[in-house]
Image: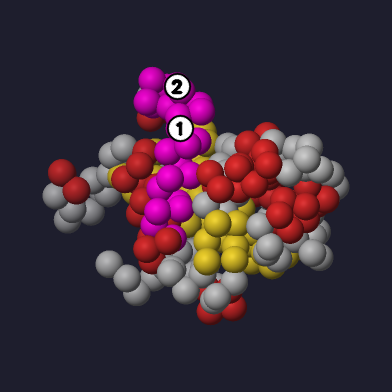
Amino acid sequence: MASCGGKAAPPQEPAQVPTAPLPTAGLASNRVPILPFTLVVAEDSLEWEQVLVDRKAVLAAADSVLGALLTVRAPEVSWVLADEVRRQARRSPTFGSNPDQMATALLRSERIVQVPDPLRSELRTLVALAGARYALVPAALVYLRATPDTSGRAPRAAVAVARAELSIVLVDARLGRVGWRTVARGEGNDPWTALTRAVKALTPGLP
């Protein structure tokens, strides 16, 4: 190509696997704890250091967005929200782990199907406290710079700055296995708009 004076094609992003819908039909009428977020990071080029500087507040806000949207958009499931998961853990004299410090972020790896110990035993105990079998785990929330629209068709005001990629899994705590996994994506000009759109992608067919 170089000897013929041709130009190398620009590198392309790997094809994205479509978001798998949340399997709510199989969870209907079941109690399902939603574990707290433990990992939220942003690409340096977004310059969101000041926006995401307060880690505790950021994690709490992400918990709130996920829990509020799922409660409204998937009411057939009896969701146990992150704050209640924390309260149940604090009230138990036998549960020695802090849900905000559990190693749930390692479940973002697609290679993990069997949950390793000690996380496996922690999840089993924590989920049992809620009288449940399954847990929904937001393993990681990553903000990347959105791919620019080069077609010229999108209005400038509609071009989003960032893309949220939410890695989320459903764990069968009794068996210690990941039964469902996906990456939900959403774009926006601020962290919470992007996350809201990503969570909405888990329940397609709704506005």
Q: Main secondary structure of the magenta part?
A: helix
| Magenta residues, start to end | 48-70
Q: Residue furthest right?
A: 117
Q: Earlier in the sequence, mark 2 or mark 1?
A: 2
Residue with the mark numbered 1 = 58
The x and y percentages for residue 47 are 38, 24
Disc 2 residue type? Val
The residue drawn where x is 64% and y is 47% is: 88
Percent position (x, y) of residue 10?
Answer: 43, 45
Looking at the image, which residue is at 74% across and 58% down? Answer: 128
55 inside magenta stretch: yes
Residue 90 disc label:
none
Left or right, 143 with respect to 197, comes to: right
Mark 1: which amino acid? Val
Q: Does residue 70 show up?
A: yes
Please state the total of marks drawn on the protein image. Answer: 2
Q: Which residue is labeled 2 in the image?
A: 53
Distance from the alpha carbon under mark 2 to that under mark 1: 8 Å
Q: Nearer the viewer, residue 120 or 19?
A: 120
Residue 130 lies in what quarter of the image? bottom right
For mark 2, give the secondary structure: loop
For label 1, count other residues whose C-alpha is less than 10 Å away and answer few (under 14), some (14-19) or many (20+): many
Quarter of the figure with the C terminus? bottom left
Q: Taking the image as drawn, is residue 201 in sight?
A: no
Vertically, is 60 above or below 131? above
Q: Residue at x 78, y 47 (%)?
A: 122
Q: Is the C-beta separation of discs 2 and 1 under 8 Å? A: no
> Looking at the picture, how far across and down is residue 180, in whole percent?
64, 66
Q: Is residue 172 left or right of residue 23?
A: right
Mark 2 neighbour class, 10 Å CA radius: few under 14, some 14 to 19, many 20 or more: few
